[in-house]
Image: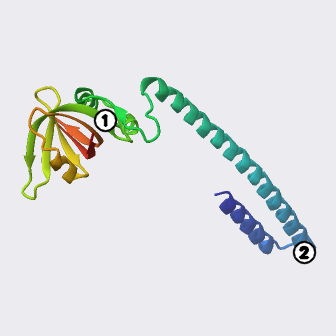
Amino acid sequence: MTTRILLALALCGSFSTACDSKTDDKKAETKKSDDKKSDDKKSDAKKTDAKSEAKVEAKVEAKAEAKTGEVAPTEPAAAAGTPAATNPKDLFAEFTKPDADMMALITKYENGATFTGKLVNVAAEANGDPVLFMDVDGKSKISLGFTDKAAIKAKNLKVGDELTVTCKIGGAMDNLMQVIDCSAK
């Protein structure tokens, strides 16, 4: 933006000099004067840009520090690469709360969640992939999607079995939550 303004000023200065009907000496003086003003303005613009950038960086850093300070007390930060430990009822409640802060939940569960619950549905799709649902509260359920389907089949799970899983969160709505990329313990 500053470059455009300076270029426009330089062009206007050159145009007004060319249209001036005074002597060639006067034209040369005016051009030198305009060039000096343009250089001064460029120098001032660079100083202003540097000051503005420093102020913006300071504000961004201050906001980041403030944001970090606000999030830390309300949401426990998961250790890098460590899934958050929870239970089906709390996990389901967090994601179905009407005024839930989804960005905070995404951050909290970015490494997944580890929880234990009882299976209320154990079936298989036509291709043999397991279809498992975990109880939340007697009414709501969590659909479990596994990465290693053969390992889950080998467990020979049945309704009522307790299972500990670590999964990524898919989403939740009404009485159903979906978790994906699960691994059983």
User: At which x and y percent is residue 87?
Assistant: 26, 28
The picture quadrant where one finds residue 173 is top left
Observer-nearest of 73 and 88: 88
Which label is found at residue 23? Answer: 2
The picture quadrant where one finds residue 118 is top left
The answer for how far apart the CA atoms under marks 1 and 2 are is: 86 Å
Quadrant (top left/top right/bottom left/bottom right) for the C terminus: top left
Residue occupying the far top of the picture: 73
Residue occupying the far right of the picture: 25
Q: Residues within 10 Å of mark 1 (few under 14, many from 20)?
A: many
User: At which x and y percent is residue 155?
Assistant: 17, 44
Q: Amino acid at mark 1?
A: Thr
The tally of labels here is 2
Q: Residue at x 87, y 63 (%)?
A: 33
- Left or right of 11 on screen, residue 122: left
Closer to the observer: label 1 or label 2? 1
Observer-nearest of 31 and 183: 183
Q: Which residue position holds label 1?
A: 114
Observer-nearest of 180 and 12: 180
User: At which x and y percent is residue 123?
Assistant: 8, 46
Which label is found at residue 145? Answer: none
Q: Amino acid at mark 2?
A: Thr
